[in-house]
Amino acid sequence: MAVTEITRDETRERAALLQVESYDIGLDFTGDGRVFRSESVIRFSCREPGAASYADLIAEQVHEITLNGTVLDPAAAWDGARIALPGLAAGNELRVVADCRYSSDGTGMHRAVDSTDGKVYLYTKFEPAYARRVFANFEQPDLKAPFTFHVTVPEGWTVLSNQPGPETRQAGPGKAGWHFPPTPVISTYLTAVVAGQYEVVRAEHVTPAGQQIPLALACRASLAAHLDAGDVLGITRQGLDFYTGLFRGSYPFAQYAQAFVPDYSAGATENVGCVVFTDQVLFPYRVTDSMYEVRAMMILHEMAHMWFGDLVTMRWWDDLWLNESFAEFSATLSSAECTRFTGAWATFSISRKTWAYQQDQLPSTHPVAADVGTLSQAVANFDGISYAKGAAVLQQLAALVGREAFFAGIRAYFAEHAFGNATLADLLSALEASSGQSLSDWSGAWLQTAGPSLLLAEFETGPDGRFTSFAIVQEARAGHPEPRPHHISVGLYRREAGNGATSGRLALVQRTEADIAGPRTEMPGLTGQAQPDLILLNDDDRGYAVIRFDPRSLRTLTESVSELGDPLARAVAWTALIDMARQAELSLPAFAGILASQLSGEPAIVIVDVLHSVIAQLIRLASPADAARSTAELATAAARLLDDAAPGSDHQLAWAQLLSWTATTPGQLDLISGLLDGSVSVAGLSVQASLRWAMLRRLAGSGLAGDAEIDAELARDPASSARRHALACRAAIPDAVHKEAAWQLLAHGDELGTDGVLEVSRGFALPGHAALLAPYAERYFAELPGIWASRGEHFRVALGQALFPITAASPELVARIDEFLVSGEHDPGLVRLLTEQRDVTQRALRSRSLAGPVRENPVRQTAG
């Protein structure tokens, strides 16, 4: 039986035994489109001659295994995932010839055919352990080696890899061979091959220090007109200059190529010198500026990985944060300091830290520096903790030791471990040396314990309304650790007189720095200050903590959060309100009401877009009645704001997008129908493909559009994404036939990538279709084991989340999860998935049971 799991203990044993000298990889993509030929030659040494080990390979068929000139029988040596290597010599050569299968889930070697023109596109996605699906190797981060790739493709194709300057020559009739020079010493998961009928733009960048770096951009031909090379290369150049200056050294690799590919299973992956992105960040239709900011952050995140992860790689996946937290932190820092997106820290607060707080309050929460014993656990930890919480913690660390000492330590860390592997201890050693501070207590509190802290203001006031005492209370959240040290700001805001149209601007009266330690920290400096309308803890967002409000502050926010002038303060306030709604402390109707009343005054389009996304998620957790009421309230606001918006503005587009999935009344549905057929127009609003499909899905879900209308729109839209949109619209049609077809496609089809699964599932599981979806609750549990066993690690998680029957949320659903979990031995990743969904279900039920808009917080917030 194939052993597909990879464990930390086994990789430690193999790393102690072996040292890899080189890989020579041949890949032939001129076959039938189902499988490709893979030839691997691995040279490696063994520290204990005579010992046995194994190599990793998942393939369709293995034709040849030769170890040190001895032919091994594949039927005996290969179990489907591992090749047994007996009797190793001091120096060894392993040659493996196999046929490997193309994937359809955006991992391994993915093959896509663009429906618009029939052109073929291949690309690799190997993180964390999919390289073994493409060539034989030792699949672990700490067995690094140089890689030489030889790629055979049909003539006319383009090939990109980690290295520039391949030699190309004919490899037979109609075939071309691309031979790349050896890479530096890198990990298996960081290698890359991108091949197909890509359009490529090439350029060069010279850094301020004079380093010349070849640049390349690639995308499929049907999106070439939307590659936006000027903007992408502009951000790329800014990032290269920023990072080489910050790290005071050269870019460590030979090129910087970026490929935008279809059906990708992640946002992007940091392959050495050849980053791969989802082509969802190329925009053939108009989007708001927040999407350009998202793309810039992605570019800068992956670029930071060239140092954090690629130059210095974690030894094993328990230090994933050494890659992702640093890339997240660096991307926000660089975006704020070297691009036009100077408000990046506010964006980080409301978009990324909300993700971290959400993940950190699930039962599956884990420390930033986690204990990861298996690959399955590693896959699950590509989450808001490893990314966003870690980045927030690093922001604190940089402030604690000082920016210069922080980056001096980082530079020393790079210098000592370049082209090698490192651990948490290695990083802390470098930072302690540069700062002269011991970081063991800090690391224990922030990297090695789980869960967020909860901060509240507790105060008393006298007859004159002034504070007679003021303290910040800290509690562990969700049973996690003892109080941590924090350095935060406390902002006191007073409401100024309004002009009739608004409730009045919230003006900052005083901002006070606070060092929090222990469960209660007195702040005598605030004694005598008049109680303001709003007390905002963590006002500048330098801390990582969940905050809550006294009743007066909460009332102020619900009435006028948009009147906070500072976008970072608004982001902090909105983040807290989002968390209250997610944790069932603020009812969905109350949260929707705040959005409906406050969005008109929100100037930051990124905050508007994030709030739209959040409320869409929350409505899926609501009772049918609450979902309908909240959707209707949002639709009324969206229609009004659309009518009032400046023509052609980002806000106008945002209101149209909100209306596209909330339209409820006959008039609203007629409006979006008229925008679709052209009988209605709104000055300045261009109803392009993405918006058209969203509107059509709303009409389909409301029973006002069917297959004929979807077919007509499909004929109108030539883009390859149109079929995915059409499938989502069909899934939304409220009848049993279409729901069954959507279920079969999602649960058992192989034509949807991750993006397709997410989109089609949104059409399938509409909140108003709970009765139609009721039969699928039990089918979920019946079919989940088969889905889990037959799909790739990332894809099965996406499916398990997308298909979960949240529309059937009830005590009975919680009991069914419990019954499933105790029914036998389950993969730890599957247990984690269902444990998280159980928690989501329970919180949904608690939210539905709220008697009023706000649940009382267990900590007394005010006294006197």
Image: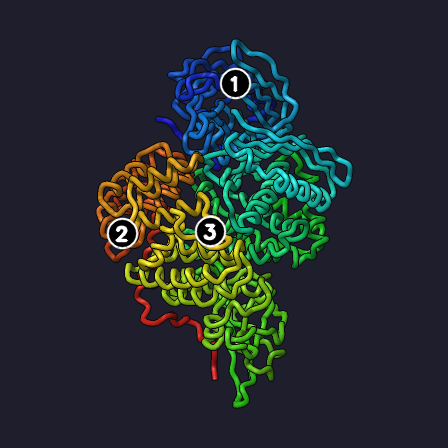
Q: Are marks 3 and 2 in contact (CB under 8 Å)?
A: no
Q: Secondary structure at mark 3?
A: loop
The residue identified by callout 2 is: 769
Rendered position, 327 above or below 645:
above
Q: Is residue 840 left or right of residue 367?
A: left
Label 1 is placed on what type of residue? Val
Give the quadrant of residue 49: top right
Name the residue beneath numbered marker 3. Answer: 366
Q: Which residue is mark 1?
A: 153
C-alpha span from label 1 to label 3: 44 Å
Question: In front of the other: label 3 or label 2?
Answer: 2
Residue 382 - label: none
Three-letter amino acid code at the position of disc 3: His
> At which x and y percent is residue 220?
52, 31
Please identify the quadrant where the N terminus is shown: top left
Q: In x, y percent, where is residue 611?
A: 46, 58
Compared with 118, 697 (above or below) is: below
